[in-house]
Amino acid sequence: MPNTPIRTLAKAVIPGATRRWIGAQQRRLNCWPPVGWVQFGSLRRLQPVSRVFGFDRGQCIDRYYIENFLARNAQDIHGSVLEVANNAYTIRYGGARVTQSRTVIFTGGDGVGWLEGCLVFITACSVGALANVRLAAYLFERNTGWTISAIAGILIGAVWNYATTSVYTWQGRGR
């Protein structure tokens, strides 16, 4: 914070030990540095501005953008909705337009099932991406134009990814 006349006067009048005690009390209350004191012109600080991801100052910055996006697109949240961890955003932004709300929670275990699901999903999407690129290249070589080649490749990749992941990843093989 820049030196203001009041700050300069306070430094002259208040003893150093008292100023250090006040600073320690501010740090103890998790509000150090106070809002507005961080000068981003110099990024030479070795300590993070906040050790609790901004919760000590209110809302995290990513939540600001996420919630603004959801508020602008609330009309698109309807029907059957899937959300991770809890359905707070579904309730807040979907309201009565949501007919079915489901949540996904990754919990406990040794993580083998989660890892297996991720590997199957990545494998299926990789094959879909290869099919997309190969079909698009094949059609382009046959002088069908890049627009038709791209659309056909995207459709093949999307259908492949949807079909394989819906069967092998999300349905839970063997259940």
Image (spheres, grey):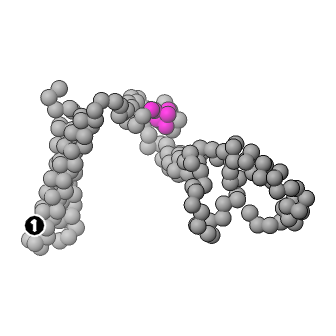
Q: Amino acid at mark 1?
A: Tyr
Residue 5 in picture, x, y percent from top left: 87, 66
Q: Is residue 80 left or right of residue 8?
A: left
Q: Quadrant of residue 40?
A: bottom right
- Residue 90 sits inside the magenta stretch: yes
Residue occupying image coordinates x 14% and y 29%? 174
Residue 106 image point, x, y percent: 35, 34
Q: Secondary structure at mark 1?
A: helix
Q: Residues within 10 Å of mark 1 (few under 14, many from 20)?
A: few
Q: Is residue 134 magenta?
A: no
Q: Quadrant of the C terminus?
A: top left
- Up-down relation of residue 120 to residue 134 (above or below): above
- The overriding secondary structure of the stretch rendered in magenta is helix
Q: Is residue 145 left or right of residue 33?
A: left
Boundaries of the magenta span: 86-91
Residue 145 in the image: above or below residue 119: below
State which quadrant residue 108 falls in: top left
Provide the residue designation for mark 1: 138
Residue 147 in picture, x, y percent from top left: 22, 67
Residue 86 or residue 164, whichever sits in front? 86
> Does the image show residue 81?
no
167 up-or-down from 138: above or below: above
